[in-house]
Structures are given as structure tokens and as C-alpha cells.
Amino acid sequence: MVTTQPQQASNTNQLLRDRVVLITGASRGIGAATAKLMGQHGAAVGVNYYGSEAEAHKVVESITSDGGRAVAVKADVRDLQQVNAMVQQVTETLGAIDTLVINANADFPITPFVDYRWEDFEAKLLGELKGAFFPCKAVVSSMIERKRGTIIAVSSGLSRHPGEGFIAHSTAKSGLDAFIKSLALELGPHGIRANVVAPGLTLTDATARLPQAYKDASSQMVPLKRNGLPEDVAGAIVLLASDEAKFINGAYLPVSGGVQML
Ligand SMILES: NC(=O)c1ccc[n+]([C@@H]2O[C@H](COP(=O)([O-])OP(=O)(O)OC[C@H]3O[C@@H](n4cnc5c(N)ncnc54)[C@H](OP(=O)(O)O)[C@@H]3O)[C@@H](O)[C@H]2O)c1
């Protein structure tokens, strides 16, 4: 564990000043970009990682070197005990969690249904839903007590529009969407908002294995004519976490440059 608590630089444009956030899967990709942007906006950031300890510490350092507060915390989001320990550690180090970002990537094979093995399908569904259920369970009691909180889940445009080979991902992410809508309904009366961001193809380690020709063709289908970047998704998450979005609850926000229009 690495933690530092220097003076926070004062900046009135910060959207998340004095907020404590926990981001699952924040060592790389969208989670790392979100951690850095939330730190720039004044949040104290719990940077969850699973295997990439060095990368998580780099994210922490980039926040603390700007005068922010952050801590790297190891936990497998599919394990209830590890998640509870992570939430306790972040709370003791940074304070009670105001914002939870459900982001950790549950990996999966890209395979047509006829070849899909149940074991791989089940692992994706359970990984995605445990990775949402356990962290939410671990933070909501405190949010309810304090009558404030925001939860943002990183879904996918594929939760509403299928893609060939992505049956497990589409099914799991549509389950995540329904889970978050239920939280928005049940927790809204307690002052807690829950929303979903739905990225299109975003350039991270998770998409590095896709052929370049596929990514180029995909970028040409985007009205803004490029692939998504982790920072694009991070911006949407910061907006939804902030009080500027205080009446947005139960929303599904595509972050796809216009590929997906609702
Ligand atoms: N990239 C895209 O095109 C795209 C599109 C739509 C939606 N999304 C969604 O965006 C989210 C982030 O994806 P990404 O592209 O940024 O992925 P990524 O670059 O592959 O990063 C994955 C992150 O998840 C963490 N992680 C994986 N398994 C974990 C576990 N069991 N417990 C805790 N952390 C775990 C990894 O941590 P360690 O490295 O420390 O293990 C890493 O920080 C995912 O939910 C993904 O489904 C991505």
C-alpha cells in the first residue's frame, strides 16, 4: 500500500473537491485515466488494482505529485472479503467513500456462440456482476447513513447493440445496466445517484489485441472520425460524479463519438 497526504492544491474549477472516490481496475486503461482526472478535480482517489501493482503506484504518484491524495489498494473485485477489506482500507486512509466507479474489466474470449464454452460465458457473467455487486454492497450502507453518494458503472455500447463474438460481453453488460437501474430506483430516495457510461471501442490494453485494420474501419464509422480514448470516458465519469449532474439518475450515457445514438 502506498499513501501520501500532502496539501491539496486549491482550484475553484475542480468538480470533485473534498470527494473520496474508489475506482475498481484503476491501474490501467479507462480506470487509470479516470483516477488521474478525478485527482485533478480534487478528489482523493482509491486506486484499485489486481495484478498491476507497479502501474497502480504510478497512477497514485501522478495524483500525489500534483498535490492530491491517493492510495493504491489490491483486491480481486470478484472476492467479497477482498472487496470489504479494500473499502475499509480506503475509508481509513482517505475517508468515507462518496463515489464508486465500477470499472474493472472482466476479460472474456471473443468467440461465436456456436463455439462458446459455458465455463467462459459463466466466468464473464459472474465476474462482471460480482465486480459490481460486492463493491456496491460494501459502500452503500455508509452512503445511506450520510444521505449522499454516486455510483457510476462502466458498461459498453455492446450492452444494447450486439457484436459478433461478443455474446458474453453483451449479456454481462446488459445485466450490469439493469443492476445499476435498480440501484438508481432503490437508492435514489437516500440521496444516492447511480448511472452508466457506455464506451464504444476505446484504445486500451483490452483492445490492443484487435487488428489495426478493424480499429481503423471502426474509427471511420464514428461521426467524430476517431477511436475513443480512455480520457474520453474519464471525462463523462467525472461529469456524472459531479454535482453538475445532480439530477441525472438511472441514465445510460454512450461515450462513442456518436456511433451509438439513443
Ligand atoms: N476498451 C474498450 O474498448 C471498452 C469498451 C467498452 C467498455 N469497456 C469497459 O471499460 C472497462 C475498463 O476497460 P479497459 O479497456 O480500460 O481495460 P484494461 O485496459 O484491460 O484495464 C483493465 C483494468 O481492470 C482491472 N481488473 C481486471 N480484473 C480485475 C479484478 N478481478 N479485480 C480488480 N481489478 C481487475 C485491471 O487491473 P490489473 O491490471 O491490476 O489486474 C486493469 O486495471 C471495462 O469494464 C470494460 O468492459 C471497455
Image: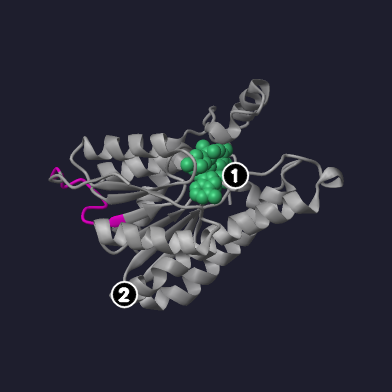
19 in the magenta segment: yes
Residue located beneath label 1 in the image: 260
List the single residue furthest toward the right: 114
Between 55 and 155, the one lying in front of the other is 55
Q: Is residue 30 above or below residue 247?
A: above
Between 56 and 139, the one lying in front of the other is 56
Mark 2 belongs to which amino acid? Lys
Q: Is residue 120 above or below residue 211?
A: below
Disc marking residue 147 = 2
Q: Badge 2: how crowded within 10 Å, few (<14), some, or many (20+)?
A: some
Secondary structure found at label 1: loop
**Secondary structure, magenta segment, majority class:** loop
Does the residue tagged 1 have its C-beta within 8 Å of any atom of ligand 1? Answer: no
Secondary structure found at label 2: loop
Instruction: Name the image colouring.
Output: one colour
Does the residue tagged 2 have its C-beta within 8 Å of any atom of ligand 1? Answer: no
The picture places residue 161, in percent across and down from the top left corner, at 68, 48
Q: Disc 2 or 1, which lies upstream in sequence?
A: 2
Q: Nearer the viewer, mark 2 or mark 1?
A: 2
Q: Badge 1: how crowded within 10 Å, few (<14), some, or many (20+)?
A: some
Mark 1 belongs to which amino acid? Gln
Q: Which residues are magenta?
A: 9-20
Image quadrant in which you'd find residue 165: top right
